[in-house]
Amino acid sequence: MLSAHQFALHGLTVPDPAASITDPEPGLQRQVLVHTPAMMLVRHHMRKGWVGVAHHHPHEQLVYVVSGSLEITVNGVSITTSAGDNFIVASNAEHQATALEDSLVLDIFTPSRQDYL
């Protein structure tokens, strides 16, 4: 089996099997699955009742809701999302999420978020 470094030499970036799970705030778990300088795939698990802080960043963010339900507010407009839903948050758009039930999402950021590494 090739190592992650050897795969990268062949143009393939693979997940780090030892990628750690972090708890950046109560009710939120984060795992950076795979990344290059241009993009990053992150798994976020939110516990029911978690309320994220409104924030913005220069990265575009594509969100896929794997399970659960979230209320998402972007620039003052709110929607409710559930398993199978997806959306894109534009660069520098203020956004915030609330977990209406235990939820799992996959986030793709472009470019990569260095603050997550």
Image (tube, rainbow, N blue to C red):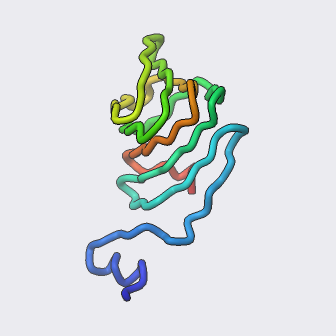
Residue 58 occupies quadrant: top left
As displayed, is residue 26 above or below residue 98?
below
Is residue 102 or residue 30 the one in the foreground?
Answer: 102
From the top left corner, tell me how far across and down residue 75 is, in percent. 45, 15
From the top left corner, tell me how far across and down residue 17 is, in percent. 50, 71
Determine the residue positioned at 62% across, 30% down. Answer: 48
Instruction: Tell me if 20 is positioned left or right of 58 in this view.
Output: right
Is residue 44 or residue 32 the one in the foreground?
Answer: 44
Residue 117 occupies quadrant: bottom right
Instruction: Tell me if 30 is positioned left or right of 78 in this view.
Output: right
From the top left corner, tell me how far across and down residue 62 is, in percent. 36, 38
Determine the residue positioned at 27% across, 73% down. Answer: 11
Residue 88 occupies quadrant: top left
Residue sitting farthest toward the bottom: 1
From the top left corner, tell me how far across and down residue 44 is, in percent. 53, 45
Is residue 13 or residue 63 the one in the foreground?
Answer: 63
Determine the residue positioned at 70% across, 40% down. Answer: 25
Instruction: Tell me if 49 is positioned left or right of 73 in this view.
Output: right
Residue sitting farthest toward the top: 76
As displayed, is residue 3 above or below residue 109?
below
User: Quick one: quadrant of the N terminus?
Assistant: bottom left
Determine the residue positioned at 37% across, 39% down. Answer: 64
